Amino acid sequence: MRTKSLHAKTINVVTLGCSKNLYDSEVLSGQLEASGKKVVHEGEGEVVVINTCGFIANAKQESIETILHFVDQKQRGNVEKVYVTGCLSERYMTDLEEEIPDVDRYFGTQHLPQLLKELGADYKHELLGERVMSTPTHYAYLKIAEGCDRPCSFCAIPLMRGKHRSTPIEDLVSEAQVLASKGVKELILIAQDLTYYGLDLYKERALARLLRALEQVEGIEWIRLHYAFPSGFPEDVLEVIKSSSKVCNYIDIPLQHISDTVLKSMRRGTTYEKTNSLLNTFREKVPGMAIRTTLIVGYPGEDEKAFNELKEWVKNTRFDRLGCFTYSHEENTHAYTLVDDVPEEEKERRATEIMEIQGQISWELNQEKVGQVFKCIIDRYEDGYFVARTEFDSPDVDNTVLIEAEKQYLTVGSFVEVEILDAGDFDLYGKVVTHL
């Protein structure tokens, strides 16, 4: 059993779920360090703070298993305190307190000051942009808004994160300047819904204004857009993407489905025709733009006809990047009133089929890149390769460019021009032709 020491306790912050949770953990760690606390991210510490995810069934299960693991470590004397925060805790706090009472205390998504106080730290409003980064130092997530006002039937995010709240442009610019001063070269803009940005503060969609302000930040070379909503997409953003040397020709726009019947039940506010029109507009106004999307299969009422329509659409649309999830029947959502009528095995089969189609599309698109030269950023060294990305790829979810380390020495975080020599389904292989 570990004996209690007199020195300051180390706080281990464990993050589960999406990049928005990662951002929150970085802010928490920054606040703790500012109060003189020793913090590690997913390391070892006497005190553990688990930032949970409660989005879908698999994520909830992972969060619960992580909580139980650290409660067991506490019972064995390997840790002294276990705290739980984040989306699962926000959504199921009462149930968790009853079912896992050995957690020292639960906090919701908007309880950062209370959590800090429990940890013996003060919440400092002036720490704008001061985060302990858990990503490589050359890229960082920038959360431009919190919460969501969309009524999507399957989504529990508004239950856990509340209504949409935009962060003022001047605050985001200040945060970006702090990040740039630390060596960040790529900003990845995240929110539950980027396209809604500014409506609450400025009474208009202001994402284009924000991009124009951020591209003025010295040291930032790439700005990437994640999680745009298709309904009401502000087309002035496309003009910025096309004209800017810093805003990547890339957009992540979760479309979820294409069947009009399913989209209506999902309460997405769009149709087959409107969705295709928007995608055509993207490709017309920004030729060569990489479009990433995510889809849900097995939604209640998704019969073979709807699924076949989705498959054919994926084949014809030829997304550059695509992810597919199985529907999760979530309590207190509108879709929970529907019958979850697609068996789990069938959901998995459909997801696999979609990803097999996308794998072939990705391979074909990658073959077209062989012989071309792309500006890339070096992310890391791994297994004999320097792993890089083009502007068309986001970290962790998209393609990588592999460069043999034996032949060329490179610096992580640097930009280079790479000639593509070979390509697989999701990886490209290349050699550096120019150091930028």
Image (cartoon, rainbow, N blue to C red):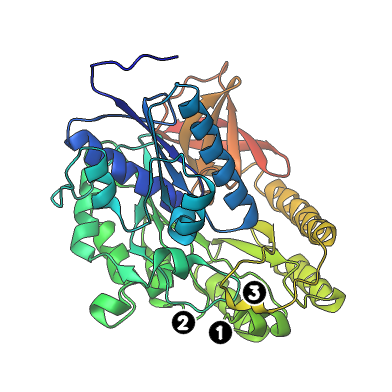
Give the residue number, with chain letter if any, for mark 2: 232
On the picture, is 6 further left or further right than 363? Answer: left
Residue 311 pos. (x, y %) = 79, 68
Residue at horizontal 59 percent and vertical 74 percent from the top: 279
Question: Relative to the observer, which residue lies in front, 62 or 103?
Answer: 103
Question: Relative to the observer, which residue lies in front, 114 or 317?
Answer: 114
Would you identify the image quadrant in which residue 171 lies? bottom left
On the picture, is 338 further left or further right than 274? Answer: right
Find the distance from the CA under tag 3 to the CA under tag 2. 26 Å
Residue at horizontal 30 percent and vertical 47 percent from the top: 220
Label 1 Cα crowd, 10 Å radius (few <14 / some 14-19 / many 20+): some
Amino acid marked by disc 3: Tyr
Question: Relative to the observer, which residue lies in front, 51 or 76?
Answer: 76
Amino acid marked by disc 1: Gly
Residue at horizontal 29 percent and vertical 45 percent from the top: 27
Give the residue number, with chain letter if any, for mark 3: 336
**Sequence-wise, which precedes: disc 3 or disc 2?**
2
Q: Nearer the viewer, mark 3 or mark 2?
A: 3
Label 3 Cα crowd, 10 Å radius (few <14 / some 14-19 / many 20+): some
